[in-house]
Amino acid sequence: MAKSKVILDMIEAAVKSKGAEMVKMGGAVFQLIISDGGPDGKLCIDLKNGSGSTKRGEEGQADVTITLADADFADMAEGKLDGMQAFMSGKLKISGNMMLAQKLGPILESAKP
């Protein structure tokens, strides 16, 4: 099973349990795409509206889209891979508002159980 699936499940659970708090941190719609994760490797995280929500798949309205491989996503979530280094080395691709991508680190941290 892909490591990213476990992390995406954690993010979904965190948004359900503490969405309002995460909306204050995020204030945007994030689209995560795990390039080798198949249909389960896509998650749209709405931290702009209400108390937040998540939806599997791809949404067209994302403020920032972040694409990376399963292993790199797992390393980032575990703190082994720095987001900026991943971006500079081409492991992480960002489209949309790049500044919003920097907010994802603290959001991932708050999703940890």
Image (cartoon, rainbow, N blue to C red):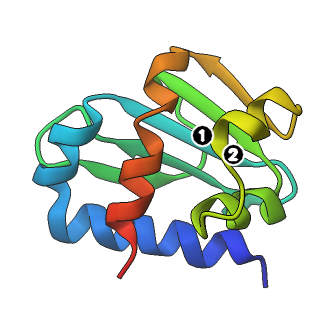
The residue that disc 1 covers is 58
At mark 2, the secondary structure is strand
Q: Which residue is found at the position 29% from the left and 51% from the top?
A: 53
Question: In the rendered image, is residue 61 in sight?
Answer: no
The answer to whether residue 82 shows anywhere in this view is yes
The spot of residue 68 in percent (x, y) is 77, 45
Q: In this view, does 108 lie to the left or right of 56?
A: left
The label on residue 83 is none
Q: Is residue 37 above or below residue 78?
A: above
Q: Which residue is drawn at 72% across and 65% down?
A: 75
User: Looking at the image, is mark 1 or mark 2 nearer the viewer?
Assistant: 2
Q: Which amino acid does label 1 sit on?
A: Glu
Crowding near pointer 1: few (<14 within 10 Å), some, many (20+)? some
* Along the viewing direction, whichever of 73 and 19 lies nearer the viewer: 73
Q: How many labels does the image show?
A: 2
Residue 1 shown left or right of residue 52 in the figure: right
Where residue 106 sits in the image (x, y, percent)?
A: 37, 50
Q: Where is residue 84 in the image (x, y as percent from the top left)?
A: 67, 34
Q: Are marks 1 and 2 in contact (CB under 8 Å)?
A: yes
Residue 83 on image: x %, y %: 65, 41
Q: Which residue is drawn at 59% across and 79% down?
A: 6
**In whole angstroms, how far apart are the C-alphas of marks 1 and 2?**
8 Å
Q: Quadrant of residue 96?
A: top right
Q: Quadrant of the N terminus?
A: bottom right
Question: For the residue marked with disc 2, what is the amino acid?
Answer: Ile
Q: Circle 2 sits on which residue?
A: 33
Task: Using a 10 Å C-alpha cutoff, classify the residue at mark 2 as few (fewer than 14 neighbours), some (14 to 19) or many (20 or more).
Answer: many
In this rendering, would 103 be left or right of 17? right
